[in-house]
């Protein structure tokens, strides 16, 4: 496969995947495996070094890909100049070469043989044939329904190539699961408070902080590399960490205080913390007086939310609430109440993230060292082209009237408009789906399946087969990130910087880069004016030259830094205008008041589970990203057997033993397709079970009569998405809360009964 075999890879990754420990400098580990002389020989004499930006997860660390003289990739390491990674890759990043070598990759364009429901049969095709089907399907939809009825669902760095294609063609019916399912409620909560969102990486100054508060945030398991490193530094210097989580997570294990909160009651705790911080005058008085609006209104508002009241709601002792509030107050302003990333939980999520934003403001941490810094980014010029045609309707048409702070397309609402029962004027009758698997990422899956079966055209662009490929009319195989160019990474950070992803090798099989696929379709649609270049490298080189660099320079250095134009923090007493109606940090949101939303967060009860049912909570593993890495041969070796976390009290009721296989059934009676082994542990509350996200893959297609699937990932564990039967929609943003679902445990295989009947 590669010079670095999987056993050696596990040695390389083991350090990074153990708790919060990070990978030591790669050369020392290489020396431990090959010997120091062999390592130096490998690095200096045999290897060709190519810059890359990792896409195993979407932290997008910059690194170096090493290939030998035969053009085989043998390893990936971090770029020491990169602020996302500081030269250290996590286990996922070092395992990225497994995506390139995975023998289950999509290899050739595929065209569906029959449209009959349930028949997932395909034939191999040429790119010309595949493009003919795609372009004809797009034109048929345009003629019958209008261009706007073709929707784009996307994720990752491939997405912008197809966004450009769709806008050039005349459709802006598009959405990204990472919006409604993850970031949109958080961004809206902070925009309503500070007039600014957080973007990625979040501008938390943890390395200079004295206190970090994590609320349902699995830092250390979601492996947001730079933030994990900063958290590790905080631990090393003896800083305070408070973790609020129903589960004793990796972060909880390294915390000063773990608060095992009752699921769905987080906002009650946040309001009680405000109560203590204001009542005991632990807030930053000068900061609040100068920079905030609505403090007296907030003070009156939170009087009723006492720690004693919160104890009855959250089950966290009032004494612990007082203690942790005082810890935060004592650390002000060097305190970060982390905003999180996947924040769509229970349907009141914008208000919960507003509460987090308000708490940070009370403690004076926004724009302060050890709190939140003001990030900067390099603004790259865009290539010139004609104005995009204005569509008759778009994602804004179907979302903005209902959700005033819907800042991006709501994928669930696009799915609603694709259902056969939808009879309104904004029908979705075709879908382009790239680098996302809606049957896993946009539950409930039964609804998504019905929407897909109601489409005139479904095109999937991806590197691997999954559930969604089975519903495609055309499958276009994309090259992995190691084989392609993509847009320059220009992320917000302490210091503006750019990073280049350059292909280390030519695409394997008949795969193609996303930019090439999008351009070829665009040209065939007559959109030549939007593609006045032959190779995407031309665009990147032009952009780089406008900011004083070039492709050649970036190939040598990988990451380039630029000077800041503004201060990173507020200076003492500085006059500062926030981008809100009042020019202040709005503890009381004037926009929310005008729009009919609660101008300050209000706790709302989410009810109790019926007898015999448990709340389903889910999260990440440090070596996997969603379902996209489960078939990666390197990462598979690190973790391929998921476990359902069950409290001993629950295990006793069900008669379950550690390691026993069980199945789940949700409140609507749906049973998991596969079983999972149990981990009986005190590390989870008795009213919940925990599933690692991304498992339970059941994608399988037949190509010329032969099965094509993710052979390692297929049938492993239970998909948490499969168990989702309802979502709670956030009224402010349309964010889709997924932590409202309840399950019970089955100890006997229900599918055997089906087979016998």
Image (cartoon, grey):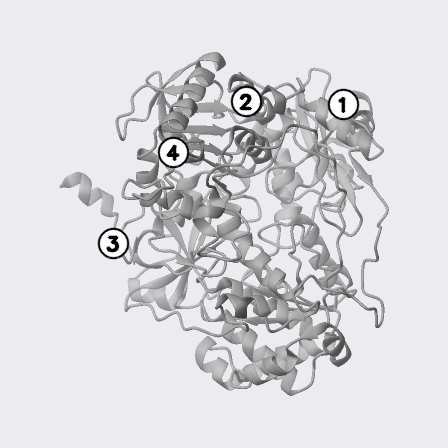
- Which quadrant holds residue 7? top right
Q: Give the structural element (helix, strand or loop) at label 3.
A: loop
Sequence-first tag of 4 and 1: 1
Q: Residue 722, position in %: x, y?
A: 36, 47
Few, some or many C-alpha atoms within 10 Å of disc 1 (few <14, some 14-19, many ≥20)? some
Sequence-first tag of 1 and 3: 1
Q: Residue furthest left?
A: 757
- Gap in Å between the C-alphas at discs 4 and 3? 22 Å
The reply to whether residue 473 is visible in this rendering is: yes
- The disc label shown at residue 563, or none: none
Q: Label 3 near label 4: C-beta < 8 Å?
A: no
- Gap in Å between the C-alphas at discs 1 and 3? 55 Å
- Which quadrant holds residue 367? bottom right
Which residue is identified by label 1? 48
- Which quadrant holds residue 35? top right
- Gap in Å between the C-alphas at discs 2 and 3? 45 Å
- The disc label shown at residue 522, or none: 2
Sequence-first tag of 4 and 3: 3
Closer to the observer: label 1 or label 3?
3
Which residue is identified by label 4? 699
- Gap in Å between the C-alphas at discs 4 and 2? 30 Å
Closer to the observer: label 1 or label 2?
2
Does residue 224 sit above or below 650 in this rendering?
Answer: above
Few, some or many C-alpha atoms within 10 Å of disc 4 (few <14, some 14-19, many ≥20)? many
- The disc label shown at residue 669, or none: 3
Q: Give the structural element (helix, strand or loop) at label 4.
A: loop
Q: Toward the viewer: 684 or 246?
A: 246
């Amino acid at each position: 496969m590669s010079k670095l075999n999987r056993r050696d890879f596990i040695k390389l990754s083991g350090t990074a995947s153990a708790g919060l420990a990070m990978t030591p400098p790669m050369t020392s580990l290489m020396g431990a495996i090959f010997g120091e002389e062999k390592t130096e020989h490998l690095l200096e004499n045999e290897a060709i070094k190519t810059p890359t930006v990792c896409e195993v997860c979407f932290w997008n660390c910059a690194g170096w890909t090493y290939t030998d003289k035969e053009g085989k990739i043998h390893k990936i390491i971090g770029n020491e100049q990169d602020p996302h990674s500081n030269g250290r890759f996590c286990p996922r990043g070092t395992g990225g070469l497994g995506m390139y070598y995975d023998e289950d990759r999509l290899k050739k364009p595929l065209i569906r043989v029959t449209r009959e429901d349930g028949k997932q049969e395909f034939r191999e095709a040429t790119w010309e044939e595949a493009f003919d089907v795609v372009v004809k399907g797009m034109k048929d939809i345009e003629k019958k329904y209008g261009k706007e009825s073709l929707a784009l669902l996307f994720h990752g760095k491939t997405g912008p190539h197809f966004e450009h294609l769709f806008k050039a063609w005349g459709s802006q019916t598009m959405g990204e699961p990472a919006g409604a399912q993850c970031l949109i409620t958080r961004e809206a909560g902070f925009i309503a408070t500070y007039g600014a969102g957080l973007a990625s990486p979040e501008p938390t100054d943890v390395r200079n902080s004295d206190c970090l508060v994590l609320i349902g945030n699995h830092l250390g398991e979601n492996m947001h590399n730079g933030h994990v490193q900063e958290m590790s530094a905080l631990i090393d210097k003896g800083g305070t960490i408070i973790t609020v989580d129903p589960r004793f997570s990796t972060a909880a294990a390294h915390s000063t205080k773990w608060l095992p909160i009752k699921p769905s009651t987080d906002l009650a705790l946040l309001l009680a913390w405000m109560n203590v911080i204001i009542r005991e005058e632990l807030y930053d008085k000068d900061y609040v007086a100068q920079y905030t609006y609505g403090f007296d209104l907030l003070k009156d508002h939170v009087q009723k939310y006492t720690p004693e009241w919160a104890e009855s709601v959250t089950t966290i002792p009032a004494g612990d609430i007082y203690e942790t509030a005082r810890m935060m107050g004592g650390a002000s302003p060097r305190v970060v109440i982390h905003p999180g990333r996947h924040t769509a939980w229970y349907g009141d999520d914008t208000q919960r993230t507003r509460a987090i934003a308000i708490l940070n403001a009370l403690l004076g941490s926004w724009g302060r060292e050890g709190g939140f810094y003001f990030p900067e980014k390099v603004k790259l010029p865009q290539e010139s082209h004609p104005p995009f045609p204005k569509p008759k309707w778009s994602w804004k048409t179907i979302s903005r009237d209902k959700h005033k702070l819907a800042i991006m397309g709501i994928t669930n609402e696009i799915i609603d408009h694709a259902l056969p029962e939808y009879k309104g004027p904004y029908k979705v009758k075709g879908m382009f789906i790239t680098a996302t698997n809606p049957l896993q990422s946009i539950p409930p899956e039964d609804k998504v399946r019905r929407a897909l079966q109601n489409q005139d055209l479904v095109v999937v662009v991806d590197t691997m087969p999954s559930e969604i490929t089975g519903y495609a009319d055309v499958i276009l195989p994309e090259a992995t990130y190691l084989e392609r160019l993509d847009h320059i990474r220009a992320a917000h950070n302490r210091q503006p910087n750019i990073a280049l992803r350059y292909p280390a090798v030519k695409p394997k099989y008949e795969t193609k880069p996303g930019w090439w696929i999008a351009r070829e379709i665009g040209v065939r649609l007559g959109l030549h004016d939007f593609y006045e270049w032959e190779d995407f490298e031309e665009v990147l080189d032009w952009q780089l030259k406008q900011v004083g660099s070039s492709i050649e320079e970036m190939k040598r250095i990988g990451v380039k830094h630029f000077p800041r134009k503004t201060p990173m923090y507020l200076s003492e007493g500085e006059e500062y205008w926030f981008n809100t109606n009042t020019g202040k940090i709005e503890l009381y949101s004037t926009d929310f008041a005008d729009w009919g939303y609660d101008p300050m967060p209000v706790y709302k009860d989410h009810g109790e589970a019926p007898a015999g049912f448990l709340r389903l909570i889910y999260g990440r593993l440090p070596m996997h990203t969603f379902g996209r890495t489960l078939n990666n041969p390197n990462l598979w070796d690190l973790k391929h057997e998921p476990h359902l976390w069950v409290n001993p009290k629950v295990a006793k009721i069900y008669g379950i033993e550690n390691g026993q296989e069980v199945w789940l059934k949700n409140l609507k009676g749906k049973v998991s397709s596969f079983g999972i082994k149990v981990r009986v542990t005190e590390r989870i509350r008795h009213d919940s079970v925990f599933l690692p996200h991304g498992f339970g893959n059941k994608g399988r297609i037949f190509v010329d009569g032969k099965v094509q699937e993710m052979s390692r990932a297929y049938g492993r564990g239970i998909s948490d998405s499969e168990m989702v039967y309802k979502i709670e929609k956030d009224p402010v943003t349309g964010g889709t809360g997924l932590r409202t679902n309840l399950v019970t445990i089955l100890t006997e295989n229900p599918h055997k009964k089906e087979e016998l009947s």
